[in-house]
Amino acid sequence: MLVKTEITQSILDFLRADLPVNLNLLGIIDNVPHIEIYVDHVEKPRGVFIKKGYFHYLYTKEDQFIEAVMNQFLQEGFYGFSGVELSIGKKIMEKYHVDWTSPCTLYYMPTENLNMKLMKHSVQSIALEDADIIDHFYTYRNEYSLEAIRKDIEERPSSAIYVDGEIACWVLVHDDDSMGIMYTKENHRKKGYAVDVTIDLASKMMKKGKVPYLQIVEGNNMSPGLAKKCGFVECGKVIWFGIVAGNPKE
């Protein structure tokens, strides 16, 4: 039986003992106030399970903890999982009807890999009024994405290049502390802008005491090269997915 708890130092220490795979859980804990956190033991956890609306976050090395999550929380309904270590995701998906999947490769930037000399252009934070433009070009645009982008701009670091007063290239930080929503307008490509905003934002995250990281979706053939050029290191596979448990109503 998993118990609901407030965040404790022992939980943070448990998650920090296995980085960078737990950077997303630590980000959610740090940035989102209204989440539910469950563990098997508050002082000596063997796993952490976080509920945030439709999406869930999970880390453990114990099959018993995964079984407890499934038995206690995944009985009837639609459930999404965000950036779960691939081995954990597979154990859950084999037990349920899988609604959708988005496999990703996890990258992080070690402190010593940050090279500010790679920047060639002036970079600034994103202006809030440009949230609509960013949402317009967002690959995963939906009815909630504009509000999320606005929060990203207001609450976390961001980086952009402006040309003649108009935003040309940008990257943000999601509420799980991952860097994303990067985009360069077509008429401003092949100028090195993506490198500039990536390095700038990684620097801002490090100054906040955080580890810059990315989750690059499978099939995105351009971003891995950019990530490596900027100093990011590949460090494993994670997966976003949705399952249907039981026979829930739409």
Image (cartoon, grey):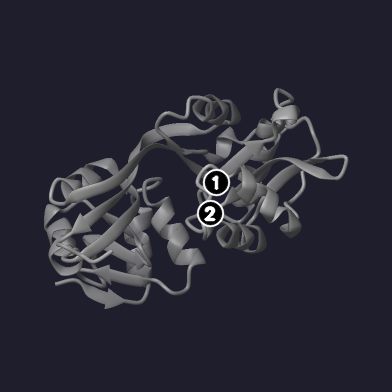
- Amino acid type, mark 1: Met
Residue nearest the viewer, comparing 206 with 213: 213
Can residue 206 be seen at all in this image of the molecule? no
| Label 2 CA crowd tier, 10 Å (few <14, some 14–19, many 20+) | many
Name the spot of residue 222 as percent of width and height, x first: 53, 26
Is 227 left, or right, of 48 in this rendering?
A: right
24 to 72, vertically: above or below: above
Q: Quadrant of the N terminus?
A: bottom left
Instruction: Name the secondary structure under disc 1.
Output: strand
- Amino acid type, mark 2: His
**Marking on residue 174:** 2
Can residue 60 be seen at all in this image of the molecule? yes
**Based on the displayed image, in which of its 4 quarters is residue 202 positioned?**
top right
Residue, disc 1: 179
Name the spot of residue 96 as percent of width and height, x first: 16, 52
Is 90 left, or right, of 214 in this rendering?
A: left
Assess whether mark 1 and mark 2 are in contact (beta carbons under 8 angstroms). yes
Name the spot of residue 155 as percent of width and height, x first: 62, 63
Residue nearest the viewer, comparing 2 with 240: 240
Q: Residue at x 29, y 52 (%)?
A: 242
Instruction: Name the secondary structure under disc 2.
Output: loop
Q: CA distance from mark 2 to mark 1?
A: 6 Å
First along the sequence among labels 2 and 1: 2
